Image (cartoon, rainbow, N blue to C red):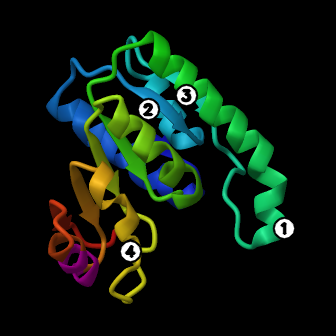
Amino acid sequence: MTAGDVSGDVHTAALARVFLQRHPDYTLRVLGGARLQAVAAETPGSDVLGDTTNCSAIGILSAIKVFFRCRKLQMQLYRFLDRNRVDAAVLCDWGAFNGRIVSELHARGIPVLYYFPPRSWQRSESAGLGIVPYVNRVATPFEWSAQQLRAAGCSAEWVGHP
């Protein structure tokens, strides 16, 4: 599971808790902030692959400030994937990071659920459709986003905005 900003961390941690309630035998590998890390810490056998606290960016200057840190996290993730079997990946928002790793996950045959896909809040017809060839499922907070993704050939569900 990956989440890079505070809201993604909150929502992904909540999703992780639901997964674990339904499947207590799941083992989590997380790249996230404090909340997602806390869920992993409470789950036997689970690991924190990296801390994404303060990895979100708005605008070019803040993106430059976090670029090298995020690049390091990406390399850590790829090293983990080289050494370990992963049954599925859940990516939450954080389009600048997850948008770069989704094709690699797909190339490795790892099924991907994208929760809160990038640019799902934009109503333009092409917003966020770049993920379609690489994901197995999408859970999106907006009905129009689900419609656009389905029209592009993606298995997408409108789950509402928390």
Residue 38: mark in rendering: none
User: Which residue carries the number 4 mark?
Assistant: 120
Q: In screen coordinates, is 98 left or right of 1?
A: right
Local crowd at mark 3 within 10 Å, few (<14), some, or many (≥20)? some
User: Which residue carries the number 1 mark?
Assistant: 61
Q: Earlier in the sequence, mark 1 or mark 2?
A: 2
**Where residue 141 appears, x then y in whole percent?**
30, 71
Q: Is residue 5 above or below residue 58?
A: above
Labelled pair 4, 2 in contact (Cβ < 8 Å): no
User: Which residue carries the number 2 mark?
Assistant: 39
* Residue 144 forms part of the magenta stretch: yes
**Where residue 17 appears, x then y in whole percent?**
31, 38
Q: CA distance from mark 1 to mark 2?
A: 32 Å
Q: Is residue 79 above or below residue 155?
A: above
Q: In screen coordinates, is 124 left or right of 156?
A: right
Q: Quadrant of residue 53?
A: top right
What secondary structure is marked by label 4? loop
**Where residue 80 appears, x then y in whole percent?**
51, 18
Disc 3 residue type? Leu
Q: Quadrant of residue 153?
A: bottom left
Quadrant for the N terminus, please: top left
Labelled pair 1, 4 in contact (Cβ < 8 Å): no
Disc 1 residue type? Leu
Local crowd at mark 2 within 10 Å, few (<14), some, or many (≥20)? many
**Where residue 34 appears, x then y in whole percent?**
59, 40
What secondary structure is marked by label 1? helix
Magenta span:
143-148
